[in-house]
Structure formats: C-alpha cells, structure tokens
Image: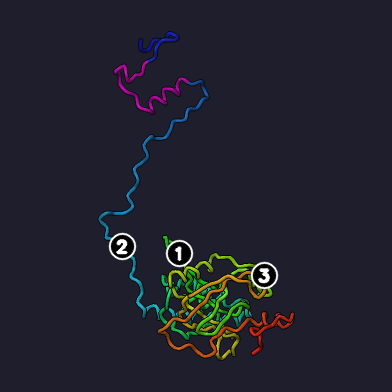
Amino acid sequence: APGDPRPGAPRRSSRLEGGPRKSYAEESLGAASLLPPGTALDVPAARRAPRARRLVDPGAPAVLPPPPPSEEEEVARLQEARALYKEYFVRIKQATGGGRADLKAMSEVGALGLKCCEGRHVGSLPGMPPGTEFHNRAEMQVCGMHRKWLSGIDYRPAKDGEEAVATALVSSGGYEDDEDDGDELWYTGSGGNDLLSSRRQTGAQKLEKGNLALKNNLESGTPVRLLRYVGEVPPERSYSQRLFIYDGLYAVTDYKYEVGARQHGVFKFKLVRCAGQPPLRKEASAKLHQRLVDLAHRDGTAGERHRVS
C-alpha cells in the first residue's frame, strides 16, 4: 500500500498515485531533511540551459567590409611607407651606429599599421615596376614586395585547398651553386646553408617549404618576382649603402636535385624571364657573397664563380 512503513513493502512513485507532482527542487529539499545532521546535499543546477542572448539586432543594417583600395591609393600608401622607413632607418642608424636599424625601422612602420599590397601575393605589384630599387631586405617586407626579410624564397602557404606557391625570390649571392645569366638562371633552393657563419652549404636540402612551393610554381605556371643583390654602393646611391633591384617576373620552367659544390644535395630551379616586360638592365647577375669568395680562395677551391671583379 502507498506509504506503507513496513520493511519490504512495495514502493510506488507519487506520480502513479495520482497525487500532486512535486518539483525537482522540492524533492531535493525533502531528501535533505532525512539526512543525518551535518550532511550536505548538492542541489544540481537547472536541467535546462538558459536561452542564448541575441547579439545581433535583426533590424540593424548589414555592415559590409570596406572596398579594396584603388591602385592609386595603394601607390600613395607605398610612397608613404617608403618615406617613413627611410626616415626611421636613418634616424636609428645615426643614434645607434647601426644596431640592426633595418629591423627596428621595419618595426616602427609596422606599429603605425601601414600595410602595403595587402592581399596581393603573386604577379606584379602597384608602384614597383621592373627596375625598382630597394635598400635592404626589411624595406622589401615593408613594401610587400618580399615578405620574408631573412629567407630567399617568399611563398604563400597552402590554404583552402590551394597548394603553396612562391611569390618572390631574392638572389643575393648566398649560394655557390647559383648560375645566373640574367634572362635565365638556375636558382638554388633554400636550406642546409650556414647563414650565421661561413654561409657555405653544410647539409642536404629537402623538398619542403619554399622549395616545395617553387616546384608547385612549375606545375601551376605561376610566375615569381625576382630581386637581385647588386652589392655595396656609395651612400649617395643608397642610404643603407646596399642595393637590391627588382628585375621583373620569371617563370619556373624546370628543377633538379644534384650534388652541389660542397658535396651536399641541393635543389636547383630554372627561371626564365617572362616576355612583355621592359628590357633587362645590363649586368643583371647577383654577385657572390664576398665571404664565400674569400673562403674559396683561401682553401684553393675557387672557380669561375669566385672570380674577383
């Protein structure tokens, strides 16, 4: 019988007795009253989650992203960024005597939120035709021409099902295996190079990162921007006393993997200058880094590539 206190008596739910149904909280409080003194009974939180607040007013007008800047606006922004970079570079160099003024000036311009060629990756860029001169690698990054101040290969990473592709290259004379004839060159891939000391090849390269991106350029037919290091120049020619020149778009037409000058495996990519551009400047060939030249003459391994001009 319902409510029968005898041991072993059948128990029935109050819901089946037809009586008033107790709430969950009332049942919990009733159970707590039967516990020994000093015993706590945690009452669970509400079973139903609170309704989410509406963050967007359905009656409010839609906010659209701003339209992309026009080419004229991008050129004006580029000129402003280059002028500011030069101003910061000269000021910092005078104050510190050097002290990586290039990177500090890049940081100062970046802190202003001034970005050039944002969203543009492959192909030509506004305001920077073939023949445009740059004074160091950090300035290239500020301008959006080449966005990696240390690496020779700038590339757009794989994203949304698209493979990585190289966007810009700097031929700075840091690899003894480069073969540069101006309109055509064999560009040595990245990796395995002792950048902080001898600059020589000390290990084998791998088909990854920038090297893999360049291979994808060959398969997709995507051209790359090529910049060459001219060398050290008088201060009246360049405020940093270094000079790089953008030589236009080049197509990746072939690649190979071979044993390099220092007996390590290297990737080499054949680049051919694209048609329809202004004629290439004279003597457009990156000079081999002077440290490599000096080491080769010192250990007797100098060849035609190491000749002193």
Distance between the alpha carbons at the discs numbered 3 and 1: 29 Å
- Which numbered disc flags the more N-terminal residue, 2 or 1? 2
Dot 3: element: loop
Question: Within the image, what quadrant is residue 129 found in?
Answer: bottom left
Q: Which residue is mark 1?
A: 163
Nearer to us: label 3 or label 2: 3
- For label 1, count other residues whose C-alpha is less than 10 Å away and answer few (under 14), some (14-19) or many (20+): some
Dot 2: element: loop
- Find residue 183 and name its label: none
Compared across the picture, whether 204 is left or right of 27 comes to: right
* 242 relative to 216, above or below: below
Q: Is residue 33 magenta?
A: yes
* Three-letter residue code for mark 3: Thr
Q: Which residue is mark 2?
A: 63
Q: Are marks 2 and 1 in contact (CB under 8 Å)?
A: no
Question: In the rendered image, which quarter contains the C terminus?
Answer: bottom right
Q: Which residue is mark 3?
A: 202
